[in-house]
Image (cartoon, grey):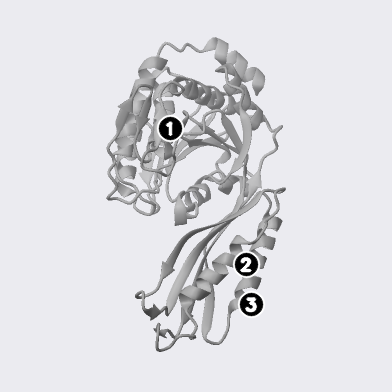
Amino acid sequence: MEDRIQKLARALKWGWLPQMVDWTTQQAIAIQQIPAPTFHEQQRALYVMEQFRALGLREVEIDRFYNVYGLLPGQRPSRWALMLAAHTDTVFPAETNLAVAHKEDFIYGPGLGDNSMGVAGLLALAAALKQQNWIPDCDLWFVATTREEGLGDLGGMRGAFDKLNMRITSVINLEGLAFGHVYHAGIAVRRLHIKATASGGHSWLHFGRASAIHGIVELGAQITALRPPQNPRTTYNIGMIEGGQSINSIATQAGLWLDLRSEDSGALQALEQQVYAQIATLSKPDLALTVEIVGDRPAGSVAATHPLVLGALAALAQVGVRGTLESGSTDANVPLAAGCPAVTIGITRGGNAHRTDEYIETKPIAAGLQQLVLLTLAAAQGE
């Protein structure tokens, strides 16, 4: 794979790149301007579908998850296929102000990097292959997935992988802000919605009765006292707390949302069991604690020595970047958990992801597109 990358880097002409960088940036902004909270990606999907059709991809369609599919046939279409993917959903509510601001080599806008730039990179790859008449060896499936963020639980990629897994042998997943990194391991994630219920009452008249909020707060305090292992890296986060009726009412209901993560499924299970033990200790006749599993992202990995991983690192080296290997929670978790080789790479750099002052850097986009083209054409030749 590394030799292929080097040969491609010498053989390909890059005169088209500056214009493609501008086009990609404009596409990222156009995509970002369409609200797409998780589970509400339809309008953004329709835009991507129009772009797929305009770029001449075949078998373009939207499924029930609002995933968008497009096929670029290869020279040997019956051989096998490679999936290129990027998620369309965002963490921001539909009413979020999506105005963008340009400042020198930075562009600011909610969701611009995560993951409008990733989707724009997907479109740019298809555009470059068509424009330069580069026909890959195998079929390429371009998929704009949904439900990657929040409580989406990778639902879009799960549906897309179920649809295509009998045709594809590897996956290249795109995240807009991950340039310079190669994610080859997907961490395990478990998400719990823990609810407390109690009889409640008046804060003065019924003082001493069980309070749902007091129960949830006590549980939260116990959770934050947990010390998960550093190796394998294992973490927790209470992301949201809710409940109560008024300041002078003993709460009848409350809840917290807990995110548990680990590089190792066994370590994650052990941490989760500690939480369940705490819940059992705090539960009593007048305070009921229940758990709903709202997220279960599978773990998986491909060896650092796998040709796809080495190819991704080699593609970065060809654009002057020393890549770093990473683990994380992305759409690639799904194929990795199923034993399908997958890597996640980026198009540019930036910062403040999941904040309204999120930004991208414009200078790395050219190199980001180069590495994507090199890796895709090399991976399309097989191992």
Task: Residue 357 in the image: state x and y as whole percent.
Answer: 37, 38
Mark 1 Cα within 10 Å, few/some/many (few <14, many 20+)? many
Q: Of residues 298 and 245, which is closer to you in this image?
A: 245
Task: Residue 90 in the image: state x and y as whole percent.
Answer: 39, 46
Tag 2 residue: 275
Residue at disc 2, secondary structure: helix
Q: Determine whether label 1 and label 3 are within 8 Å by CB.
A: no
Point out the image quarter for the C terminus: top right
Residue at 27% of width from left, 37% of height from top?
Answer: 99
Which numbered mark, 1 or 3, is in the foreground of this view?
A: 3
Tag 3 residue: 281
**Amino acid type of disc 3?**
Thr
Point out the image quarter for the N terminus: top right
Residue at 69% of width from left, 34% of height from top?
Answer: 304
**Amino acid type of disc 1?**
Leu
The quadrant in which residue 365 appears is top left
Residue at 29% of width from left, 42% of height from top?
Answer: 34
Residue at 60% of width from left, 28% of height from top?
Answer: 312
Tag 1 residue: 122
Cα separation, mark 3 vs mark 2, equals 10 Å
Mark 2 Cα within 10 Å, few/some/many (few <14, many 20+)? some
Whether residue 18 is visible to the viewer of this picture, yes or no, is yes
